[in-house]
Image (cartoon, rainbow, N blue to C red):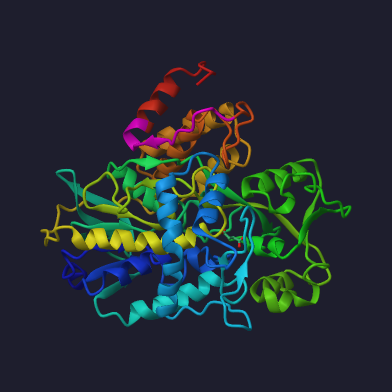
């Protein structure tokens, strides 16, 4: 791989979704390497994003309202300063995307068409092609990246280890289909997405098992709030993986949730079908657990306009044999977004020198315990520019090729998926989490194909075990109340392994 080794010294951006593409574009004309495990455009959750970007650009809206809604959804765990900074930067991010060629939906009068999603007090979701915002963003950003000469795209290589020397990033060990390479670099930006593949039911694409979290954790980075996984209440109930999403925007246009008897079973929930996502997901989950079926009914409120308002959703419903104009759509919750991630500061820097993170893999403090819908694409675009500025300002340095690191076995998340799905679902309890930690510990300490997914799973279940309260998306049946004082969870792989060893040594300590 002599051609790849010639790229030594350039910042390496790992991940080809919106966060990775934006970071690369923001760094131009500085030469960078964009490393993507899958061909660019496939394998990224961004491409599947339906809702859009939340931005307070409506005439009846303000950043203060957007901040207030974000804090309320985050259930006491958001970092208010970060929320303000991202929300205030959102309108400019929309303009930047338009300059890069993204075409957003507009009203006949030419204003941005704004959708409504759960827990937003105003219409503020900027979207494209109805509910195909992610694929439109990816189309435009990939086109921009491909004509930017400073960006070298390396597709088909998966980052498997970060090389750390003297406490600083020194390289990336990447694995291709038939070969591997160690890229020498002093600057790495993780933009690897979420953890949906650790769940049986997920809207995330294959490959999203938290590889970025494993990379960062093994490099010694601090991680935050790993127990907070958002379940989307309305994925299309069927065998397809990833599960197609019936966007919250459909409920924003008035669609309701009904059961097989046609009963609106969430009508009494404050906010009803547009309550915060965690509350709606729990309501749907509990109704299903009682033996009911759950459907989105858009017949009255959208009816004949469904195909023109939501063409992509209409298309996959039809593929599944459902006509949303005249039939209710069967749904159930699915793992959708990870609020936790690599702990980063206001410039996207992790605790490891030379390592940044942005997008879903990062934990900035924006989302708290429950992400407000459509805040994440906004966050990815805004924080990519912060990270790029910080990477660009860091001392470059052509690094010598670091010592060869052993290539780990190719990851297989199957074992971890079974354990995480069981223990880390919408409702959790101490026994389930302790059993999961015990199952993960030997896998995480080993070197099999299950090791990296097990490292991620172990960090998540131990974080969930330590949070002895119910808050936002983290619902413990054995600790149903919310603590008076909110605290973020900060862990390292070292601290997690120590705790897991203590748990193993005290199997009867049921209060842990
Ligand atoms: C949706 O369209 O319902 C999803 C939007 C999001 O997850 O932010």
**Does residue 96 appear left or right of residue 369 in this picture?**
left
- Relative image position of residue 227 (x, y in whole percent): 49, 39
Q: Looking at the image, which residue is at 51% across and 76% down?
A: 136
Please name whichever residue, 288 or 450, is drawn nearer the observer in this view of the structure. 288
Q: Which residues are the magenta region?
A: 482-495
Which x, y percent locates residue 378? Answer: 46, 62
Name the one closer to the observer, 104 or 28: 104
Nearer the observer, 170 or 349: 349
Q: Which residue appears farthest toward the right when viewing the image?
A: 261
Overall secondary structure of the magenta section: loop
Residue 468 lies, in percent from the top left, at: 53, 27
Name the residue at 19% across, 60% down.
Answer: 393
**From the image, which quarter does the N terminus lie in?**
bottom left
Can residue 159 be seen here? The reply is yes
Relative to 100, residue 399 above or below: above
Along the horizontal axis of the image, is 115 left or right of 190?
A: right
Q: Is residue 70 above or below residue 135?
A: above
Asked if the stretch drawn in magenta spans residue 430, the answer is no
Which residue is at the front of the view, 220 or 306? 306
């Amino acid at each position: 791989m002599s051609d790849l080794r010639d790229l030594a010294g350039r910042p390496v951006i790992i991940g080809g979704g919106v966060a990775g593409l934006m970071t690369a574009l923001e760094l131009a004309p500085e030469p960078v390497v964009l490393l993507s495990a899958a061909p660019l455009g496939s394998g990224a959750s961004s491409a599947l994003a339906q809702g859009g970007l939340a931005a307070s650009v409506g005439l009846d809206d303000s950043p203060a309202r957007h901040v207030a809604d974000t804090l309320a959804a985050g259930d006491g765990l958001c970092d208010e300063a970060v929320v303000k900074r991202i929300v205030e930067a959102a309108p400019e991010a929309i303009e930047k995307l338009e300059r890069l060629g993204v075409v957003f939906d507009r009203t006949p009068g030419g204003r941005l068409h704004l959708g409504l999603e759960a827990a937003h007090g105003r219409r503020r979701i900027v979207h494209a092609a109805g509910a195909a915002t992610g694929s439109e963003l990816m189309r435009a950003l990939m086109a921009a990246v491909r004509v930017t000469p400073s960006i070298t795209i390396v597709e088909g290589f998966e980052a498997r280890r970060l090389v750390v020397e003297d406490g600083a990033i020194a390289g990336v060990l990447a694995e291709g289909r038939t070969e591997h390479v160690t890229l020498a670099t002093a600057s790495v930006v993780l933009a690897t997405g979420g953890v949906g593949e650790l769940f049986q039911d997920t809207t995330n694409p294959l490959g999203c098992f938290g590889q970025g979290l494993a990379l960062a954790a093994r490099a010694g980075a601090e991680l935050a709030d790993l127990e907070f996984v958002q379940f989307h209440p309305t994925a299309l109930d069927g065998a397809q993986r990833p599960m197609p999403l019936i966007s919250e925007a459909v409920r924003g246009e008035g669609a309701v949730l009904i059961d097989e008897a046609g009963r609106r079973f969430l009508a009494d929930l404050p906010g009803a079908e547009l309550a915060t996502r965690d509350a709606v997901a729990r309501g749907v989950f509990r109704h299903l657990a009682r033996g009911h079926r759950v459907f989105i009914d858009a017949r009255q409120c959208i009816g004949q306009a469904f195909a023109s308002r939501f063409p992509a959703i209409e298309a996959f419903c039809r593929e599944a044999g459902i006509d949303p104009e005249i039939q209710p759509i069967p749904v159930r919750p699915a793992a959708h977004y990870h609020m936790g991630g690599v702990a980063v500061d206001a410039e996207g820097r992790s605790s490891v020198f030379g390592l940044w993170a942005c997008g879903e893999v990062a934990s900035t403090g924006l989302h708290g315990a429950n992400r407000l819908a459509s805040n994440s694409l906004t966050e990815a675009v805004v924080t990519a520019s912060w990270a790029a500025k910080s990477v660009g300002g860091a001392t470059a340095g052509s690094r010598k090729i670091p010592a060869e690191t052993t290539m780990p076995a190719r990851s297989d998340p199957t074992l971890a998926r079974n354990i995480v799905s069981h223990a880390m679902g919408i409702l959790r309890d101490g026994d389930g989490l302790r059993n999961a930690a015990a199952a993960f510990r030997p896998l995480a300490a080993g070197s099999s194909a299950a090791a990296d997914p097990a490292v991620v799973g172990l960090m998540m279940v131990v974080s969930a075990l330590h949070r002895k309260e119910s808050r936002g998306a983290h619902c413990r049946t054995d600790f149903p109340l919310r603590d008076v004082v909110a605290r973020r969870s900060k862990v390292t792989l070292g601290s997690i392994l120590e705790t897991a060893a203590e748990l193993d040594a005290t199997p009867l300590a049921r209060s842990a």
